[in-house]
Amino acid sequence: MAFQITPEYIKALRQHLEDKNFSGLESLLLDLHAADVAEIAQSLDAEQAYALMQTLGPERFSDVIVYFDEERRGEILENYTGKEIAQVVLDNMDTDDAADLISELPEDKKREVLSNLEDLDLAKDLADLLTHAEGTAGALMATELVKVNENWTVLHCVREMRRQAEDVEVVHAVYVVDDNDVLLGSLSLKKLLTTSTRTPISEVFERKVRSVTSTTEDQEVARIMKKYDLFVIPVVDELGRLLGRITLDDVVDVIQEEADSNYQLMSGLSDEVTNDDGLFDMTRARLPWLLVGLLGGVLTSTVIARNESELILIPQIAFFMPLIAAMGGNVGVQSSAIVVQAIANSTLQKNLWTRLRRELGVGLFNGLICALVILLYSWGMGHGLLFATTVGGSLLAVILFASLFGTAIPWVLDHYGVDPALATGPFITTTNDVLGLSIYFAIANALL
Amino acid sequence: MAFQITPEYIKALRQHLEDKNFSGLESLLLDLHAADVAEIAQSLDAEQAYALMQTLGPERFSDVIVYFDEERRGEILENYTGKEIAQVVLDNMDTDDAADLISELPEDKKREVLSNLEDLDLAKDLADLLTHAEGTAGALMATELVKVNENWTVLHCVREMRRQAEDVEVVHAVYVVDDNDVLLGSLSLKKLLTTSTRTPISEVFERKVRSVTSTTEDQEVARIMKKYDLFVIPVVDELGRLLGRITLDDVVDVIQEEADSNYQLMSGLSDEVTNDDGLFDMTRARLPWLLVGLLGGVLTSTVIARNESELILIPQIAFFMPLIAAMGGNVGVQSSAIVVQAIANSTLQKNLWTRLRRELGVGLFNGLICALVILLYSWGMGHGLLFATTVGGSLLAVILFASLFGTAIPWVLDHYGVDPALATGPFITTTNDVLGLSIYFAIANALL
């Protein structure tokens, strides 16, 4: 049932855009969900997207622009004055989306939008929302909600809810507050449906309600909502007064962004890059890590250069250098990844010491198997038993060290407030290259 | 407001368990959310966890056991007969959770549970749910929902909803069906609140409703719900008949699992492993990738061995071997990661050819910078301009090749139905090690 954008569809659409056939365009877009229109508009160039957006009525325009990525939204909104944005765009938009949109505008346009809003309550709400720091519950929340007073009856509530519900798209929960707007609890719609209309609210509402404060980190909000299977969570200020609510769909975005950013960190991409970023953005995201790798490579070259005499004497040592370096990196990333995930899912109950011992066990076991394989291989290739033992022994030592380092580094990073996912990126492979080769040469020097 | 499990708390709890002080235990757990009790029970050993679970009443027991991981749930349920599970455990459990729980039991116990269920409708529902393949919408869905007939009035609906709502914890949506149970649309609670009770439902319900069939892949369900910001989506059979519904919290788990599994693939962990898995599971998850890495290492050693005479002549070549190999791996992972993410987010609009050209541009730019750095470095170290050019030129060539390979491989894997995230794991680093060194020696042979 999901709409699929076919190449034929896009072709017809582009043709309409070129022909300035706006009625044809409108009929093509008529039955589409705003998210689909946005997906189409994102696949066009900026000028065509602007032309397409101009064919939409104001309500539809607002619906669609919410789904754009920040860059495309900026390109479109450049064509509108602050007054137009205030009057046309923000109409029909949820406060959290509106606040996000405004926060992306240049400073002067931001002020122009806020001062041109006719709905003064909305202007106040939005100005409040804009004060919250990015990455906090306050920045995620919307102010649309249905709240009732603890002193009302069910009938009064239903009437009041009908009135409030006019402004609210979907009723996720009904919050109960006291006269000072302090959050007391929540009221399930089910309860409301199944209770006599004369009952006082104070007798039927649920007094235990989980909430977050506006300064709670968004990751923590995600953790709480995931853990307790919440669809919506109220946001309060330090005095417990109800400020807004966060719905699970916003938290899904937080979870997805976190996963994407971990993935990028691991892959050696330092900035949020997307498929469509230009050469400069791509380079900025990738070059720093490549230079880190290069520095690591220079360090390994120094380690090797210092052992040149050994290499000239026994050139076979060189054969296994990349193997030793690569295996150190592989094991290090494996060990780190397990710790990083445990930290992310807050399942790291055991202390570092227990964990290191366990990793040492796994490393010893895997290391012995790998060492034996490579010992037999190099012996079989006619390198002599002493040389084969040197390679196998070095591999075992490197795997053990890499297990310990891989376990400890993310733990230490996390301890000092650095994102531990960093440890599974190029950083650890590079460190392990240098470490691995040093161990290899030390053992070769001792044995051969 | 979130509950934090402190070491003191756990200590008190263990003490109560050891003293068999069950009333003390109960009072400790009294006010906790089931998810918190589960978190505590997961941190105990199996025997203690069982003792703790025995102090809970049947309803609470069901609430808590849902939050366990599969392994711990199995350990606890081993102590109960199929009859006990049917009568005690499944009471008060949502059908999706109950089906998950039953599906994890051994075959004979599964049958014992189903045949001992007193509620025959529930038994039928659960048996139906168990037929759906893992990873499909059918396996994710629950059958609890509120549905009304298109021919009813609003008043009739509200009455019927009150009745149905008895069995449903939270009313996410009201679905409208025809006499054959075919899904026609949905009815918003808001509409229901704000419409006169005599209005026929057919006049007020929303006829456009997005649904999935029971065979839709769970990843696709997640994509649709994310894209359209849906909190709940109905599941229908091939005839369009309403079977159940999937809520966003279940999809959050799908998204999280997918992210975790990508992360593990990238880190060279072949199975779902957690922090607390034993030595055998850890080894099984890690050893296969290490052996792949080892095979790659053996291949690199063959490449080097074939160029032994060159190495004996110019030992400095060895200095930069790990650098060349590592940089190939780094660039390859970067390029792959961008493609893998684009595939995952379905943002890969452009064709492979455009993409390869773009990557080549970025690779050329980054490659030139890195090559220049290493050329100047090795020249400065007194290796001679020709040698320095060899190293720099090789690095450039390796970066270009790795960019192309890194871009193409996930694309090809995806094309053949293999998870493209595989391409950002040890696989690509290993391939690039071999490729990089081959290029390096080819250029060295030509120039030196």
Image: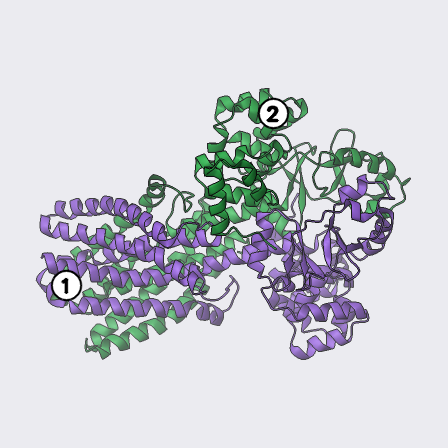
Chain colours: A green, B purple
Indicate the quadrant containing the N terminus of chain B: top left, top right, bottom left or bottom right: top right
Residue where numbered disc 2 is placed? A87
Q: Between residues B400 and A218, which one lies in front from this camera angle?
A: B400
Observer able to see residue A294 = yes
| Cα distance in 3D space between marks 1 and 2 | 77 Å
The residue lying at 16 percent from left, 55 percent from top is: A305
Q: Earlier in the sequence, mark 1 or mark 2?
A: 2
The residue lying at 43 percent from left, 39 percent from top is: A45
Residue type (three-letter) at the residue carrying disc 2: Gln
Q: Please provide percent x and percent y for residue B330.
A: 32, 53
Residue type (three-letter) at the residue carrying disc 1: Glu
Vertical side of A191 occupied by A363: above or below: below
Residue where numbered disc 1 is placed? A310
Q: Is residue A154 left or right of residue B208?
A: right
Q: Check disc 1 and report its element: helix, strand or loop.
A: helix
Indicate the quadrant containing the C terminus of chain B: top left, top right, bottom left or bottom right: bottom left
Q: Please provide percent x and percent y for residue B42.
A: 62, 61
Badge 2 sits on which subunit? A
